[in-house]
Amino acid sequence: MPKQSEAKIRASGDALTNAARVLIGIVRVTERNESRRSSGAELSLDVELTGGGTETWKITIERTASSH
């Protein structure tokens, strides 16, 4: 794999990781406000493609373990 492609993939991975952290933070704030714990949250996103058409992405954040 060319170095340029690898760098783009890594950059995308970092963006996805940062987006997941934001979603996790939103879930935690909601839990604190509602004084309860949930097991996760889901985000649905429609993306318009440059060649026409639309993709739908569903992102699920689910807690599988907790230290408290």
Image (cartoon, rainbow, N blue to C red):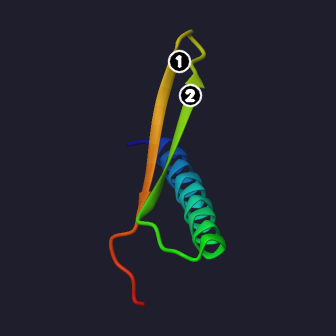
Crowd around label 2: few <14 · some 14–19 · many ≥20 (10 Å): few
64 relative to 30 in the view: left or right: left
| Amino acid type at image mark 1 | Thr
Circle on res. 17:
none
| Amino acid type at image mark 2 | Asp
Residue that appears at 60% across and 16% down:
50
**The quadrant where residue 32 appears:** bottom right
Residue linked to disc 2? 46
Split into 4 quadrants, where in the image is the C terminus?
bottom left
Q: Position of residue 19 (x, y in %)?
A: 59, 55
Residue linked to disc 1? 54
**The quadrant where residue 22 appears:** bottom right
Q: Are marks 2 and 1 in contact (CB under 8 Å)?
A: yes
Q: Position of residue 10 (x, y in %)?
A: 50, 53
Q: Position of residue 58 (x, y in %)?
A: 45, 39
Crowd around label 1: few <14 · some 14–19 · many ≥20 (10 Å): few
Using the image as rendered, state which of residue 51 and residue 66 is in the foreground: 66
